[in-house]
Image (tube, rainbow, N blue to C red):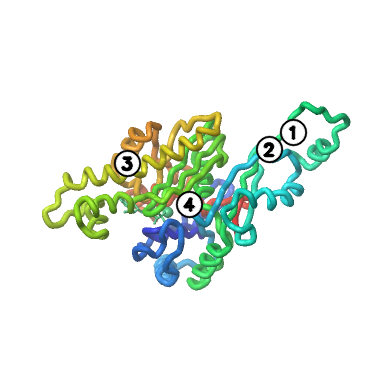
Amino acid sequence: MAIDIGGYSIKLVRLAESAKGYELLDMGMISLPPDSMVEGEIENPEAIEETLKNLLKMEQLKSKNAVMGISGQSVIIKKISVPRMAEKDLEEMIKEEAEQYLPFDIEEVNLDFEIVSPEVSAEAAEEQEAPEEPEEEEEEPQMDVLIVAARKETIQVFQDVAEAAGLRLRVLDLDVFALENIFELNYELQPGAVGLVNIGATLTNMNIVENGVTAFSRDIPVGGNTISEEIQTRLSVGFSEAESLKLGIMFDDFTKEDVVKPIQAGIELICLELRKTIDLYEKTSEHKVSKLYLCGGTCLMSGIDRFIADKVETETEFLKTFRNIKINTKKFDPEYLEKMEAVMAITIGLAIRKKDDKQVS
Ligand SMILES: Nc1ncnc2c1ncn2[C@@H]1O[C@H](COP(=O)(O)OP(=O)(O)OP(=O)(O)O)[C@@H](O)[C@H]1O
Ligand SMILES: [Mg+2]
């Protein structure tokens, strides 16, 4: 089963895989006390353990094996160019290479890597190492490698939480790779670059994929809370009152009119960050980001797709998480599914991870 611990809620999904594809077996969600998880960091493990136990009890699952996802400051993904070589040689080299790109000590992180272009076989690499007549002017052929590093300390906290809830943490993947998975499952391979954007409560995960592969990613500390905080300060209410107003639950003399401007201001802050990320990527890329695929709880806000398209000046579409997943509508209410499509994108993406996927533990 896949478990996605977020700033707002914990989500759980179990899929069955067969030759025909994936089928949804279980799906559940439970709210977390505020500040239990902030920007991808577990701040209150006890609260998360308790809540996770409750969710597992509600879902009555027998399996103990879990896949979880991480994001935020503890994870670094970096695409680098290295001379073409076989994977086994690369493994030795990557540790030294990675060191200069990491803000952490190399001993503090778990490292993984993946060759993302163009792959070379061991034989071909050996041939390359001993060319008959080395030509002086010719540039050494390069390949792109995605280096993934995650802090061991953070990984340990996830492991502890899983264990305390009676689970075995089999895989800890990255949220941005879950986005890549869900996109690959549901969309045809597209030339050029598109952005996958998960707008949660405290964090927005953004993955720019080129020809279906991660090219650039950022976890940005903005989300639904940014919108609630705008309401909070502009209307001088508490955070939970602001959260209610955002969801259209009015109280005192507040009207829906009152919250329009603060909501727009909050989304604009998110848009600024999306634009910045696109600009950063485009500065060093031959591609332009042609479209943003949106998901995450904040995307339940009606009209947010058009608002973002307008502000970021990039076409948008809501990510169709369930498009290629078989779902029994007798078991799952279509109306509920419609809501969960945005919320469960990361969780489903974690559940469909493949055997040779990159992972950090
Ligand atoms: N109908 C709605 N309209 C507007 N916002 C909503 C709606 N439903 C949920 N949200 C907001 O979506 C956010 C939660 O989204 P999500 O479940 O994706 O976050 P999370 O995964 O728990 O948090 P994070 O990824 O930031 O750690 C909250 O800010 C919540 O207020
Ligand atoms: Mg999330």
Pointer 4 residue:
348
Of 181 and 8, the residue lying toward us: 8
Q: What amino acid type is highlighted by mark number 1?
A: Glu
Which mark lies nearer to you, 4 or 2?
Answer: 2
Label 4 vs 1, first from the N-terminus = 1
Residue 10 seen in the figure: yes
Pointer 1 residue:
140
Of 51 and 56, the residue lying toward us: 51
Label 4 vs 3, first from the N-terminus = 3
Label 4 vs 2, first from the N-terminus = 2
Q: What amino acid type is highlighted by mark number 4?
A: Ile
Label 4: how many Cα within 10 Å (few below 14, some 14–19, many 20+): many
In the rendered structure, the answer to whether residue 335 lies left or right of residue 74 reads left
Residue 13 x/y as whole percent: 46, 57
Q: Secondary structure at mark 4?
A: helix
Pointer 3 residue:
268
In the rendered image, the quadrant that contains the C terminus is bottom right
Q: Going 51% across and 37% down the picture, which residue do you hit?
A: 281
Label 2: how many Cα within 10 Å (few below 14, some 14–19, many 20+): some
Q: Going 30% across and 46% down the picture, which residue do you hit?
A: 266
Pointer 2 residue:
143
Determine which of the numbered discs, if any, sits on residue 212 in the image.
none
Q: Quadrant of residue 79?
A: top right
Label 3 vs 2, first from the N-terminus = 2
Label 1: how many Cα within 10 Å (few below 14, some 14–19, many 20+): few
Work out how far the residue at label 1 is from the one at label 3, CA to CA, in angstroms. 45 Å
Work out how far the residue at label 4 is from the one at label 2, CA to CA, in angstroms. 31 Å
Work out how far the residue at label 4 is from the one at label 1, CA to CA, in angstroms. 41 Å
Q: Secondary structure at mark 1?
A: loop
